[in-house]
Amino acid sequence: MNIPHRAGLENFPPYRQGKAPRGIDGLRAFKLSSNENPYPPLPSVLAAVTGAVASINLYPEMAAEDLTRAIAGRWAVSPDNIGLGAGSVEVASQIIHAVTDPGDLVMFPWRSFEAYPLLATAAGATPQPVPLAANGSHDLAAMAAAVTPRTRVIFICNPNNPNGAVLSAAAVETFIQSVPSDTVVVLDEAYVHFNCDPDTAVGIDMFRKYPNVAVLHTFSKAYGLAGLRLGYAIAAPELVITLRKVAVPFGVTALAQQAAMASLRAESELQERIDVLVTERRRVHAALLDAGLPVLPSEANFLWLDSRDRTGALAGLFEDNALSIRAFPGEGIRITIGTPEANDRILDVARQAASLLAPLP
Ligand SMILES: Cc1ncc(COP(=O)(O)O)c(C=O)c1O
């Protein structure tokens, strides 16, 4: 059957989900390929979700007024500044749909979050990737120089997925000032809770100063609600109104709304878990360096091995030890920080790897 489809989709790869770990006899398997939170939901969050389950025969409240108010209160902004979606990936998609005409450009650093080019293409816009600088940071000067009148949306990913690199407030502010004030600059802060860099750009601060900034946050990572799908934008009311127009109706379930409100009430408990993950990230980073592996500094809940042409061999070693990681052939490997037990396994593999693999020149 020959079903016509939109031009360009024949070369359009679907989003690639992080792999499940391979089962190996005698080894507990750990999935470290999707930057998920390794801890189960808090009892108070489970109770909120359980309380909402009895009503799943009903559509959710589309405006999600209570949650919108709770998030707005959390950031001391107006509810008119909050746009919700089924994960921040859906909110990113809403922004592109709301702002671009067919053929307009959506700029992003590359390599970065793999969904950016896919979301742009799916919306009928044209992806405009700008290579990262040699140190793995966004090349903000090159991005500023590449802006054209058709560049309508620019993603900044801080910390960047997959390498964990952070942008300073000064660098991001200079960048925002250099782009036209009607270009939407999206500060994607999916990993903001793990970012302890004192000089980092802070999305909400940029938003308060520059109305063309939209901040993207998610409940998937630090809050551990990846399976319920909830993210939001903090943006100018004019933009939020259009986001609500292009959002998939009823995309945010009642379970997600209840879980998110319970999570906001439990932020101090969640912070303890975030602190553990940050401590573990530092421990694993230091031990990988000690083992001689090319690990970069990271302010997210994952680490990046700059393994280049050794990526295949190294990835195989992790997989053979019941760890799924995210390998980018020829580039590197992203490893999510898990429980201490999972992280100890990473370090076992790293020590085997160091003796197997010749050091990079
Ligand atoms: C940088 C970045 N932004 C957004 C997302 C989307 O997360 P979610 O749709 O679960 O909120 C991810 C997920 O991996 C990410 O890495």
Image (cartoon, rainbow, N blue to C red):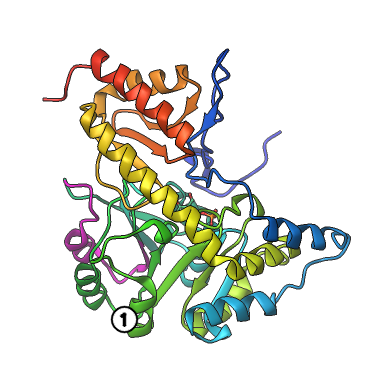
- Secondary structure beneath dot 1 equals loop
Looking at the picture, which amino acid does disc 1 mark?
Ser
Q: Position of residue 224 (x, y in %)?
A: 57, 53
Residue 137 among those drawn in magenta: yes
Q: Position of residue 168 (x, y in %)?
A: 23, 65
Residue 249's quadrant in the figure?
bottom right
Q: Residue at left 54%, top 40%?
A: 14
State the quadrant of the C terminus.
top left
Res. 344 in view:
yes
On the picture, is 232 further left or further right than 200? right
Q: Is residue 348 above or below residue 198?
A: above
Q: Nearer the viewer, residue 39 or 300?
A: 39
Q: Is residue 48 above or below residue 241?
A: above
Q: Which residues are magenta?
A: 135-156
Residue 63's quadrant in the figure?
bottom right
Q: Position of residue 179 (x, y in %)?
A: 26, 74
Q: Residue at left 58%, top 12%?
A: 25
Q: Residue at left 50%, top 41%?
A: 34
Q: Which residue is mark 1?
A: 181
Q: Position of residue 189 (x, y in %)?
A: 41, 62
On the picture, is 219 further left or further right than 287? right
Q: Nearer the viewer, residue 41 or 88?
A: 41
Q: Is residue 329 above or below residue 125?
A: above
Distance from mark 1 CB to nearest ligand 1 atom below 8 Å = no
Number of numbered discs on residues: 1
Residue 260 among those drawn in magenta: no
Q: Residue at left 44%, top 49%?
A: 276
